[in-house]
Amino acid sequence: MPATACVTLKDLQINTVIGQYGPGDVVPRAHLLDMVLHLPADLVLVDRDAMEAVFDYDPLIAQIDRIARAQHYETQEYLLSRIVRACAGYPQITALHLTLRKTPVRGDSGALGVSLTLDPAAMDALRAAG
């Protein structure tokens, strides 16, 4: 079995506005992003302690922040799609699984979200589509 590697991000609270809410509606207090980014193993199994030897995820996180703040979104799906396309801009990311969720959903409880998984073939197709 070939070596595989992932960078995992969990519960990143992003600053965004999603949806339309009326009087009496539960307005989410938080939008949370989880990401599992698949990378070539040699970006995690390294022989030296240097940033140029690993995947630098900080620029991607900054890009996600800009995307999230860029506009008022009607749907979680569209924001998640924009984040996936940002990830596709990094050739080191060979596959991914992302989840975007909002909380609370009813009263003061619950989380509701959308997830998307792209395998290497789906990532290649997304990149080819531009």
Image (cartoon, grey):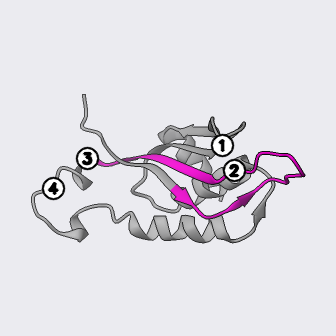
- Residue drawn at 89 percent across, 52 percent down: 22
Up-down relation of residue 65 to residue 40 (above or below):
below
Give coordinates of residue 8: x percent, y percent.
38, 47
Say whether marks 1 and 2 touch (CB < 8 Å): yes
Residue under numbered circle 4 = 46
Q: Which mark is residue 28?
A: 2
Kind of residue indicated by mark 2: Pro
Q: Earlier in the sequence, mark 3 or mark 1?
A: 3
Q: Earlier in the sequence, mark 4 or mark 2?
A: 2
* Residue sitting nearer the eye, 92 or 19: 19
Say whether marks 3 and 1 touch (CB < 8 Å): no
Give coordinates of residue 107: x percent, y percent.
71, 38
Nearer the camera: disc 3 or disc 1: 1
Nearer the camera: disc 4 or disc 2: 2
* Residue sitting nearer the eye, 37 or 110: 110
Start and end of the magenta stretch?
13-40
- Residue drawn at 56 percent across, 67 percent down: 65
